[in-house]
Amino acid sequence: MTGPVTGALDAGLLDDVLARAVAVPAISDFPTVDALLDWFSALADDHPSLVRRRRVGTSRLGEPIDMFSIGDGPRPHLLFAGVHPNEPIGFRTLQHLAAELVADPGLRAATNATWHLVPCIDPDGTRLNEGWFGDPADRAAYARGFYRPAPSEQVEWTFPFAYKDAYFDDVIPETQALMRLIDELRPELMVSLHNAELGGVYYYLSEDLPGAIGPLHAVPAALGLPLHTGEPESPALERLAPAVYRAGSTRDEYDYLESLGLDAAAMVGGEGSAAYARRHGTVTLIAELPYWSHPAADDTSETTADYADVVRAKAEALVDLGTTLTGLLDDARADLTLRSPFLRASEAFVPMMTASGTSELVRAGRLPARPATGAEVFSNEEVVRMFRLRFGGMLVRALAAEASAGLATARLHRVHARARALYDGWLADALAVTGLEVLPIERLVGVQYGATLTMSHVLAARGSGLSGLSGESGESGRGGGRR
Ligand SMILES: [Zn+2]
């Protein structure tokens, strides 16, 4: 446990964080990999005494992965973006944070940290999303240009894992780079830059730190963004406060699936970064942000729908989605020649739709009767729309790759046409949802930036409240032994 704690943020610091969060200048797009890395290289060239550049790894396709370190305080902070390459808000957050740290000695002094920034940990995957980065408000372009790696190829979820009947050690090179960094730096604070898609703001914290929740709620409130109070990403998650969850571990997921009587070892993969870094006492923050908000995101009023029925309807729709996409894949399989990332992702995610729907059906059967909230109704419906667009879309891209390379057989062309027609219908359904508000990117960056500064200050206060240790990393009372 954490021992004596004085973690609350004082009012002056909170005011400073909120002022910085709302002052992020207007941003209209996301950078390509080349533009992002060029920007950081120029920053390092322009400020050689402040910004140190170092290669820390190599992507699977041979792209060097660089880290940029700013400041020389004793508190190591590690931030990495592009961890899911379809989630680019963090690219802009790291650019803004780096620019502020370089320009503002007051900010460097106030945090007393060394900031280690990895602008893009998955350049290969990010390049496959660049088609929609120029106009992120366009949901159709986003859907058609979306790419998310198969779980076994995701940086976040390929840390080593051994638990009960599960064993995973197929660690991809990008994750190996992060493991080396985490073990070398032993960060006091780690921020894995993710984002969500549609709804409200929510967070993951690896520890329930006193004094953290209030400021983490205050940041999106100051920016006029709703919290996400609907369905969490997994029923296995522990809710620490509204829209704040304990950072998930694959162990929790395993135990949850096992409790449903399912074959957990076959359903989980690797461990996450937060669980890996816990060995060093590292506190992890993840700030999840949507591109589009909806009035139902934080609607806690009761509806006439029963919650179990809402979950069951989603589960049945996911099983149906899995069955439909499996049929297309089966019809195409004999003629597929390209092991493209889109095909690898489709082959991994399509059966997961059936499995996820099946586990939610079991859960629905065990839920007591109670009314669902507006947020729960909307978020359960939205996840079906999102998965149809994501995984249907990547299957269409896998088939399109065969066609554009001149390799598609007549049968493959027919499967491609069927998949496109189905997908066009799903896209039309999603575009028919009313009430969406496109969120300005600077406000989303403001949340990640403000939340990061909040956690840095909260941890500094905890350090001073303990024994005067100024954040030297290690096991010195940082509550690393929770698990
Ligand atoms: Zn993510």
Image (tube, rainbow, N blue to C red):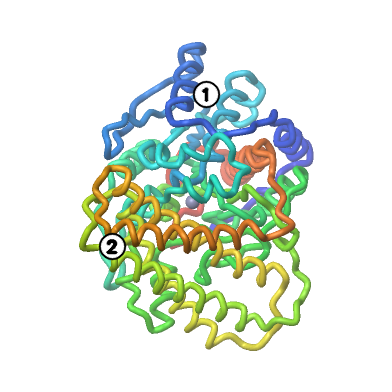
Label annotation for residue 332:
2
In the image, residue 417 lies at what x, y percent?
Answer: 40, 58
Q: Is residue 54 left or right of residue 137?
A: left
* Displayed quadrant of residue 222: top right
Of residue 215 and residue 345, the one placed in the foreground of this image is 345
| Quarter of the image with the C terminus in it | bottom left
Which residue is under mark 1?
71
Q: Residue at x 42, y 69 (%)?
A: 353
Question: SS at mark 1?
Answer: loop
Q: Residue at x 65, y 54 (%)?
A: 210
Question: SS at mark 2?
Answer: helix
* Displayed quadrant of residue 326: bottom left
Q: Is residue 445 left or right of residue 399?
A: right
Of residue 140 and residue 250, the one placed in the foreground of this image is 140
Proximity of marks 2 and 1: CB atoms separated by less than 8 Å: no
Q: Amino acid at mark 1?
A: Gly
Q: Dot 2: few (<14), some (14–19), or many (≥20) neighbours within 10 Å?
A: some
In the image, residue 5 lies at what x, y percent?
Answer: 63, 52
Tell me, yes or no, if residue 340 can be seen here.
yes
Residue 94 to residue 415: above or below: above
Front tag of 2 and 1:
2
Q: Residue at x 42, y 39 (%)?
A: 126
Q: Dot 1: few (<14), some (14–19), or many (≥20) neighbours within 10 Å?
A: many
Q: Amino acid at mark 2?
A: Ala
Residue 40 to residue 270: above or below: above
Label annotation for residue 310:
none
In the image, residue 288 lies at what x, y percent?
Answer: 58, 51
First in sequence, mark 2 or 1: give its number: 1
